[in-house]
Image: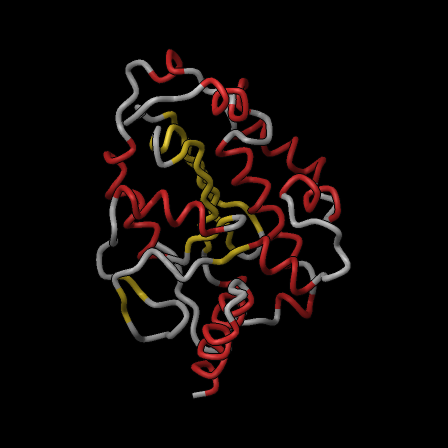
Amino acid sequence: MYCVSSVGQSWTEQPIHFVDFEGNQTSGILEFGVATVLRGEIVATRTRLCRAVGKVSAAESAVHGIAPNDLEGASPFADEWDYFTALRESGPLAAHFAGVENALLKAVWPYPRRSPDFARPGQEIFEWGPWVDTARIFGQLYPKLETAGLESLVSAAGVGAALEAVAEVHCPQPRRRFHAALYDALAGALLLGAMARDPQVASLSTMQLLALSTLDPVKRDHLSQAELF
């Protein structure tokens, strides 16, 4: 499907699948959006609404704009097993504050199929992560930024106009807004694209990008040390 990066190769040569979910642990995943980035460009997208597994509260609907009647006739997110496991096999998953997406994904499927460990080339694991986390990466690479919120970073990175343009092509008309899954996934994908245009950041390997995605110093050192050997 796509090439797989090796030690020392730029992360931009590795497909990265930016994922966003709308929903929570009670309602389940109500909408997903995926934008695949390769060489700094968005090369594939996918989105749909999903049947709720629990109550969709009015407060939740006010945030993401999805009402229970919008989900009538939708198939459950669990039907997407083959799609999401194939994504995980071809490249690392990415998200903005990835712990949220990881928890929602694991609530449906605790583990994917055996997949490459992109933090340790040549090895395989049964995990959805490690994730590329744009919130953590921007916080470490650009510490002068006042906030790591997705909308704020889109503005700071100067990709707002590009987001509107790609959303018009890829997003359903009512879902061209923040807190819509594909719109947010496209926003994150464009942040990756902005990083790819920074020569110093583009020179990082996938392993280094994953190391920057964790605030845990032990995990970060472990990933960094793995690259040395």
Q: How is the image coloured?
A: secondary structure
Image x and y of residue 111, in percent: 25, 54
Residue 83 vertical placement versus 115 (above, below): above
Image x and y of residue 126, in percent: 25, 61
Q: Nearer the viewer, residue 190 or 78?
A: 78
Image x and y of residue 229, in percent: 42, 88
Q: Residue at x 53, y 62 (%)?
A: 213
From this viewpoint, which residue is outermost toward the bottom? 229
Residue 84 vertical placement versus 113 (above, below): above
From this viewpoint, which residue is outermost toward the top? 69
Q: Residue at x 45, y 44 (%)?
A: 19
Q: Nearer the viewer, residue 144 or 182?
A: 144
Left or right of 153 on screen, residue 32: left
Left or right of 2 on screen, residue 75: left
Numbered label tally: 0
Image x and y of residue 26, in percent: 34, 31
